Image (cartoon, rainbow, N blue to C red):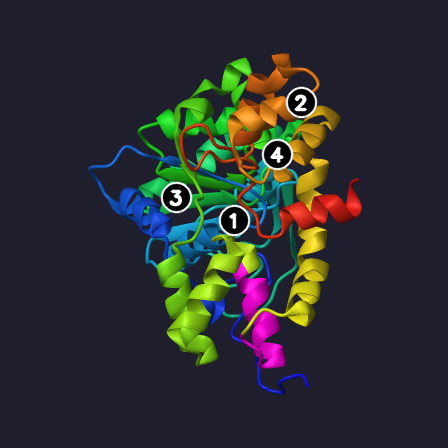
Amino acid sequence: MMNSKISPFTRTPGVAGKAIIETHFSDEIINNFNSEDSYKYVYKIVGLRGSGKSVEYSLVMNHFRGEKKWLVYSLSAGGNPIQTLISELSRIDFINNKKVSQSIGGNIDASGNVGVLSAGIQAQGTINISENENYYSEEATLKGMLEKVSKEKYNVLVGVDDIAKTEEMAEFLSILGTLIMDPNINIRFICTGLSKNIEDFVNLPHLSFFARNESITMQALNLHSMSQKYRQLLGISHEDAVALSKFTKGYAYGYQVLGEICFNHQKYVIDEEIEAEFDETIGSQYDLIWTTMTQSEQDFIKIVTNTDTHAVADIKRAMNNTNSFNSLRDRLIKKHILVSPSYGCLEVPLPRFKEYVNIWHT
């Protein structure tokens, strides 16, 4: 029987709710962006899908939305970030670069008011406004707007969640590099993304600033903190909470999924019903991870997941050709799909990923 109460767990990207487990990555970013002594202006949060990147991103963005003298803009990864940021900034009262010249007709009173006689009588008149030709140089316009914002002692924080390479985004990052170096502009940037998508940018020759700036890699959640949350939110014993935590392997999305399933069913020991619903729910997330791999990487993962010892020597023995072992291992570690928990061992840090592979990809 399903529980009629509202679950404290969530699967909404960027939201952790009451079940949040602090990693303190967001605290590091906030402290550096706030500090006058820090020169860290750009942060990239990378990691596997479902590892909690968007949660850390949201914590940073929401913190500064509540700060005075901070203007915060979250831009979509698939849109035109330059045009969007210009449009957002143009809404500020003291910024309006688009209309600059005026031709005035009609009666003007002694004080210079258009269309109003000094006696208070309405007069006929027209105002013709022509557009500033320089407005359509987006880089110049954006720079001018940000200079005005900085003169008013504002800081600007721009963020992109789940960034991916497009011509528009590459152009924006190129311009961002020059804006960050401008001493008259106070701007900070944060983004999240898969390692492969981040690398697509850093390999561009004119985006070296992006490559050199700070990266934070999301790690598995702390199992002790996770078990405490399960105890608190599910009202269960320490032993049951530890068992649930170990089942998730610290995978952030798996933690939320399992918590929600247990909460809804009011069952806190993993049986066939809980396991089956977990597999069904998390399968769509694993589909996204699976499609990021090449065929050779997928074949390699099949071997790794079915090598129960996790030993590199045993994995190599199962391969037809070991010449590609090093490159496959390194690429998959970089994608956060593989980890090396100890010397000479490799494993996939995802709960029931072996079962997913064997059911759907064999």
Mark nearer the N terminus (4 vs 3) = 3
The residue most toward the left is 37
* Nearer to me, 344 or 14: 344
Mark 4 crowd level (few <14, some 14–19, many ≥20, 10 Å Cα): many
* Nearer to me, 101 or 261: 261
Amino acid type at mark 2 = Met
Q: Quadrant of residue 164?
A: top right
Q: How much space separates mark 1 and mark 2, taking CA atoms?
A: 29 Å
> Disc 3 marks which residue?
149
**Disc sitting over residue 304 in the figure:** 4
Amino acid type at mark 3 = Val
Q: Residue 85, percent across and down?
A: 55, 42
Q: Secondary structure at mark 3?
A: helix
Magenta span of residues: 255-268
- Please state the total of marks drawn on the protein image: 4
> Disc 2 marks which residue?
319
Mark 2 crowd level (few <14, some 14–19, many ≥20, 10 Å Cα): some
Q: How much space separates mark 3 and mark 2, taking CA atoms?
A: 59 Å
Circle nearer the viewer, 3 or 2: 2
Mark nearer the N terminus (1 vs 3) = 1
**Disc sitting over residue 24 in the figure:** none
> Disc 1 marks which residue?
51
Q: How much space separates mark 4 and mark 1, taking CA atoms?
A: 21 Å
Q: Quadrant of residue 320?
A: top right
- Kindly report the secondary structure that dominates the magenta region of the rendered protein: helix
Amino acid type at mark 4 = Val
For the C terminus, the image quarter is top right
Q: How much space separates mark 2 and mark 4, taking CA atoms?
A: 10 Å
Residue 262 lies in the magenta stretch: yes
Mark nearer the N terminus (4 vs 1) = 1
